Amino acid sequence: MYDFAYHKPGSVADAVKLLTADPEARPISGGQTLLPALKHRLNRPTALVDLSGIAELKGIRKEGDTLTIGALARHVDVAESAEVTSAIPALARMAANIGDIQVRNRGTIGGSVANNDPAADYPAAVLGLGATIVTDRRRIAADDFFQGMFTTALEPGELLVAIEFPIPEKAGYAKMRNPASRYVMTGAFVARLRSGEVRVAINGAGPCVFRQAEMEKALSANWSPEAVANIRQSPEGLNSDIHGSAEYRAHLVTVMAKRAVAEAG
Amino acid sequence: MLAPPSPVTVEIIVNGTPRRACVEPRTTLVDFLREHLGLTGTHIGCEHGICGACSVLLEGEPVRACCLFALQVEGLSVTTVEGLAPARGELSRLQNAFCEAHALQCGYCTPGMLIACHDLLARNPRPSEEEIREAIGGNLCRCTGYQQIVDAVKLASGQEAAHG
């Protein structure tokens, strides 16, 4: 690993100042993706800006119909939060099954969402619930946020501060994880919002999390696992690797969507 | 060419004692423990967040010491495998159970396994086989001694081993 300077600012403003002043500086929260990337020399920042001391990035709170989770909330914090468990139990269960316990004790929701790994869990919940990404300078709808493999709407130096989730009427998540790496092969997050809108987000299967419009339409008319049972996802453009072909992942989309609806109840 | 960042002093409470060293920012916690403090009980396996051999307790919770910089842990409390035994020359109940159930062959994964299992028993004193297997899901054993490791945790929790 190449060496770098280390900064630990105490506020979002100071962190953004450091990141803006040096385009080669990178923020670090849990570091569960960044550290391995640095070791493999896939990334060579001049400086790391440690966000862990910034109080504005912390906390989980429920206000009205919205659950707001600070960027620094670790997976274990989300899994064990009474607010999350009561407001969006599917989100708490998702967090409880990310990676392994060592990862859950360090990894953060902000880091996972900003990284947008195709095989990450959280992007499915953010897109499936139609959440809003709050940054140091603006608010971004989930539909505009995830732009491609490891690519988001975040600008250089822009910091993800919190995520606002609308509390849904019901939501469910199911995934097939690779038994060795525990990364998502294919997952489906389904939600029926209080506005009546139905959303289905698929992760792991393609280069970026995406919405499954046909399933959304079917579930809007009939919220039941049977409603999606005969909807086939096209394998075109899906990921194909040693762990599974695009055809296999396409098949899993239907299976996971069915299970997610069943879980949502 | 940029001048290399200068070393910084870091203080971490290790097994109950504040320990201080001068480190480069890129020094990982596991290198701090092994190279600077001479605590070689924590092993380095894959070095990129897969094998779990480097697991330690950070503020009582298992984390991978290879995926943390020492500077991120400034002022916090770390327990290594050396800190699990109640006293010098003794072993914990779990460590004794590992010996009894033959839960190690080469022993490379053992410190990480002990940390993960110690944490499991602290949270869940009578775990099921499924819960034990889930708890060690972040730790690899290349001797494939998982069965005996599960048996050892059962034994340490006062339950009969399923495969003894």
Image (cartoon, coloured by chain):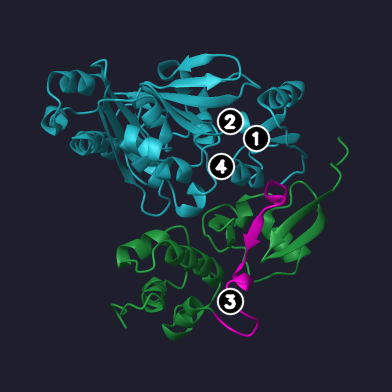
Chain colours: A cyan, B green
User: Which tag is nearer the camera, tag 4 or tag 3?
Assistant: 3
Residue at numbered disc 3:
B85
Instruction: Report how far apart the C-alphas of labels 4 and 3 lie in the structure.
Output: 32 Å
Question: What's the residue at 46%, 73% (across, down)?
Answer: B143
Q: Which sits in the foreground, B84 or A176?
A: B84
Q: Which sits in the foreground, A211 or A81?
A: A81
What residue range appears in magenta? B70-91
Dot 3, crowdedness within 10 Å: few (<14), some or many (≥20)? some
Q: Earlier in the sequence, mark 2 or mark 4?
A: 4
Dot 4, crowdedness within 10 Å: few (<14), some or many (≥20)? some
User: Which tag is nearer the camera, tag 4 or tag 1?
Assistant: 1
**Circle 2 — which element?**
helix
Whether tag 2 and tag 1 are in contact, CB under 8 A, the answer is yes
Question: What's the residue at 64%, 21% (across, down)?
Answer: A156
Whether tag 3 and tag 2 are in contact, CB under 8 A, the answer is no
Residue at numbered disc 1:
A51
Same chain shared by disc 2 and disc 4: yes
Q: Looking at the rendering, in which quadrant would you find the C terminus of chain A? A: top left
Magenta segment: does it hold B89?
yes
Whether tag 4 and tag 3 are in contact, CB under 8 A, the answer is no
Q: Which chain's residue wears label 2?
A: A
- Residue B145, position in %: x, y? 42, 74
Question: What's the residue at 71%, 32% (across, down)?
Answer: A10
Give the amino acid type for the residue marked by disc 2 in the picture.
Answer: Leu
Residue at numbered disc 4:
A33
Give the amino acid type for the residue marked by disc 3 in the picture.
Answer: Ala
Q: Is residue A168 visible?
A: yes
